[in-house]
Amino acid sequence: MLGKKGHWALTVNGDDILGEELIFLNMFETVGLNLPTLAMLFYTTDEDKVKRWSEPGYPVEIGFGIDTIEDVSTFKCFSRKVSSIGGGDQWSVELKAIYDSLDYVNKQLTNVYNTWGDMKKSSEVFSTVVTRNGFKPDVPVPSNDIMLWTQYNITDRKLLEEVVWHGFFSINDPCLSALRKDAKAIYKPLSKIITGVKGIIGNSEDASIIANSFTLNNNEGFLSSWGGDIREIPHHHSEKGIDDFDKGSVTPKVVRTSGLTPSLEKYQEIELLNDNVHDHWWEAYRQNRQFRSSLSSQVMRVTSDEYTSIFPLDYYRTKFLRQDDKTLLAPYSGKWIVSDVVTSVKDSAFTQHISLSRETLL
């Protein structure tokens, strides 16, 4: 087992990769429907080990923890580069792997969920699809979007993309999703994500994740004008064969900074209205897209040198204090949603890079 007592521990296929062999390992998780991914490089003089790791689809089992292994995930290698060093006395193996659920991104299926007499909600379809791909669904409340969902010879990944874009729980309560390395699949409305703070990130004494510095990216100006402006929405009613406009029905969630962009009349794409989809099909799409764009307006990145079981869509509070007088840095503290986690080991040093998102500063 690799690691530093009281800070972090790592195993790669048990103890197949030794501490002196591992050059770097990076594990990536993000909000959305992408599977977790892995990149790794190691050196070895063991030719048999090189042969094993060169097998197509070789399984890679990664375990992380503090003093004992707490979280174990299995990946499948899909790309590798093997190089000989010193005439074959030493070898380097660089590989890329994806979470072991390849049917999710590769297998095309044709399904209907289920019949006109037994139509399903997006929350039910999501749970069905992730379960057959080896995930445990975390869907705390049913959605309000019953219809006949169809999978038209596309992958489960593509199907869920359409499901969550048009998923609807309630007005002004957009939905978010994530596939985590602990085999949990999250599909929740925002109101359920922000119900409980998991811990504190910062440099205060009560912080559960110690981070002495941070960087902040502010994209509010662009995203306010692109995703948040009031728009005119053209509708085409297929049964009636008429067009109309819904003026000003999209309300900005992010306050637009005046003077950054000229005031322009903007239009949404034409929305085709018919009886084949649920009543909030386009309304769900608008509020989900708008929230996802506005959520990226403020992104804070922090780094910790201790392992924490932190995942995308976790809800944390930040608490940063000035070094001299220990007063609170109020604009940068508060509640954030975890959007990305990169867990890295390089040259026997551990770092966990965490991206936090919200709409505005305090």
Image (cartoon, rainbow, N blue to C red):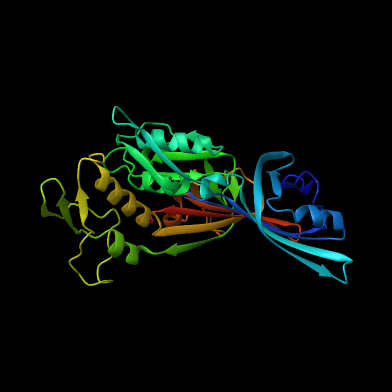
On screen, residue 242 versus residue 362, left or right, reads left
Q: Position of residue 191 (x, y in %)?
A: 36, 39
Q: Residue at x 55, y 45 (%)?
A: 103
The residue nearer to you, when weighing 263 against 150, is 150
Q: Position of residue 223 (x, y in %)?
A: 33, 62
Q: Position of residue 144 (x, y in %)?
A: 30, 34
Quadrant where the image shows the C terminus:
bottom left
Q: Position of residue 75 (x, y in %)?
A: 65, 48
Tell me: residue 128, above or below residue 236: above
Specify the quadrant of the image occupied by residue 189: top left
Q: Is residue 196 visible?
A: no
Q: Is residue 233 visible?
A: yes
On screen, residue 329 versus residue 66, left or right, reads left
Q: What residue occupies the far top of the structure in this picture?
A: 117
On screen, residue 194 versus residue 324, left or right, reads left
Specify the quadrant of the image occupied by residue 213: bottom right
Q: Residue at x 70, y 45 (%)?
A: 61
Tell me: residue 214, above or below residue 104: below
The residue nearer to you, when weighing 41 against 162, is 162
- State the count of labels: 0
